[in-house]
Image (cartoon, rainbow, N blue to C red):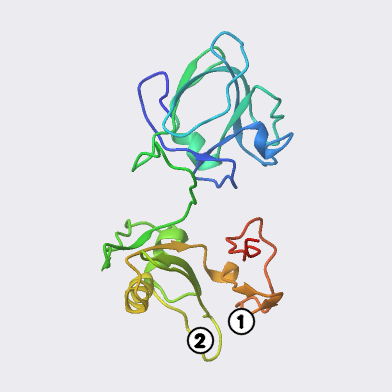
C-alpha cells in the first residue's frame, strides 16, 4: 500500500490481524473485520464508487471514507477495511478522511496465464537444489521457528509425481524437522521443486477417512482449509 506521503508498506489480505501488521479486509471475509482494539480505515472508490474485486498483478486506488479507532468495522459490499494493528498504527503515516491510497497486488513471479495457484512458503527446493532459508533478525515466531525442529507439511513435485509430505514433532519419538532438514528429505524423495506449507499443530495427513500421522495437539486441529487429492472415476 502506498500512503499519501509516498511511503510504501506491505499488507496482508483477509487474515488474522496481528499487532505489528496491516490487513486489508474485503467483503469476502464476511460482514465485519472481526478485530479488536485497532485503527481501521473504511475505504471506498476514489469518487465514492464501489471498489472492485481484487485480482493479482493489479493496482487499485481507494479513498478513506472513515477512520475508526476501534475494531470490528463493517465491510459492506463495494468497500474495503484496512486494519492497522496497535503497534503498526503508531508508526503508520498520518492519514485523514478524504485521503487516497494505492494498493498493489503485484506478485513475484507474475501469475499471467496461471490457471491454479496455492499460497505457502517458503520455497524449499528449486531445480532439485535446496533453497537457503533467509531468516530476518527479529523476534517474530513465524520467522524464528524456521530454524527450529517442528512438525512440518510440504508439497513437492517432479515431472511425474506430486509428493504430499507430513512430518510429526513436539512429542516423544518425533522431534520434527528444520526447514533445511525438510528440503534435504524432499530432494532425497525425488522432488525437483517443493514448497513448505503450514506446520505445527496444523500438520495433518488424512487419507481414506483416517488421520495417518500423529498431530502434536493430540487431535485434528480445526482449521479452515486443506490441500486435497481426489481420485477420479474411470472414464467410460
Q: Which of the pair 102/72 is nearer the observer?
A: 102
Q: Is residue 134 above or below residue 114?
A: below
Identify the secondary structure beneath mark 1. Answer: loop
For residue 174, which numbered disc appears in the image? 2
Q: Which of the pair 160/96 is nearer the observer?
A: 160
Mark 2 or 1, closer to the camera: 1
Query: Where does residue 105 sit, x and y in percent of width and height?
Result: 44, 33
Locate the N terminus by quadrant. Answer: top left
**Distance from the alpha carbon under mark 2 to that under mark 1:** 9 Å
Of labels 2 and 1, earlier in sequence is 2
| Left or right of 110, for residue 76 | right
| Left or right of 44, for residue 91 | left
Q: Which residue is mark 1?
A: 214
Query: Where does residue 101 sit, x and y in percent of width and height?
Result: 47, 21
Would residue 70 be seen by someone viewing this image from the given angle? no
Would residue 205 be seen by someone viewing this image from the given angle? yes
Query: Where does residue 24 sit, x and y in percent of width and height?
Result: 56, 34
Q: Quadrant of residue 162?
A: bottom left
Q: Which of the pair 220/125 is nearer the observer?
A: 125
Identify the secondary structure beneath mark 2. Answer: loop
- Quick one: label 1, few (<14), some, or many (20+) residues within 10 Å? many
- Residue at 55% over, 47% down: 18
- Residue at 70% over, 63% down: 222
**Mark 2 vs 1: CB contact within 8 A:** yes
Amino acid at each position: 500500500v502506498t500512503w499519501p506521503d509516498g511511503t510504501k508498506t506491505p499488507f496482508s489480505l483477509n487474515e488474522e490481524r496481528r499487532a505489528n501488521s496491516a490487513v486489508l479486509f474485503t467483503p469476502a471475509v464476511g460482514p465485519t473485520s472481526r478485530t479488536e482494539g485497532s485503527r481501521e480505515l473504511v475505504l471506498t472508490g476514489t469518487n465514492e464508487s464501489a471498489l472492485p474485486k481484487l485480482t493479482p498483478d493489479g493496482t487499485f486506488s481507494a479513498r478513506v471514507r472513515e477512520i475508526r479507532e476501534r475494531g470490528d468495522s463493517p465491510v459492506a459490499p463495494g468497500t474495503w477495511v484496512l486494519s492497522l494493528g496497535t503497534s503498526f498504527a503508531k508508526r503508520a503515516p498520518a492519514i485523514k478522511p478524504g485521503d487516497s491510497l494505492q494498493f498493489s497486488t503485484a506478485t513475484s513471479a507474475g501469475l499471467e496465464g496461471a490457471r491454479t495457484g496455492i499460497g505457502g512458503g517458503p520455497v524449499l527446493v528449486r531445480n532439485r537444489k535446496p533453497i537457503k532459508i533467509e531468516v530476518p533478525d527479529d523476534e517474530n515466531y513465524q520467522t524464528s521457528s524456521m530454524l527450529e525442529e517442528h512438525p512440518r507439511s510440504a508439497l513437492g513435485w517432479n515431472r511425474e509425481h506430486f509428493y504430499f509430505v507430513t512430518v510429526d514433532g513436539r512429542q516423544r519419538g518425533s522431534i520434527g524437522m528444520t526447514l533445511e532438514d525438510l528440503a534435504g528429505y524432499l530432494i532425497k524423495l525425488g522432488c525437483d521443486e517443493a514448497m513448505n506449507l503450514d506446520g505445527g499443530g496444523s500438520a495433518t495427513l488424512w487419507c481414506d477417512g483416517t488421520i495417518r500421522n500423529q498431530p502434536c495437539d493430540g487431535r485434528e486441529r480445526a482449521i479452515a482449509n486443506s490441500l486435497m487429492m481426489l481420485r477420479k472415476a474411470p472414464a467410460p
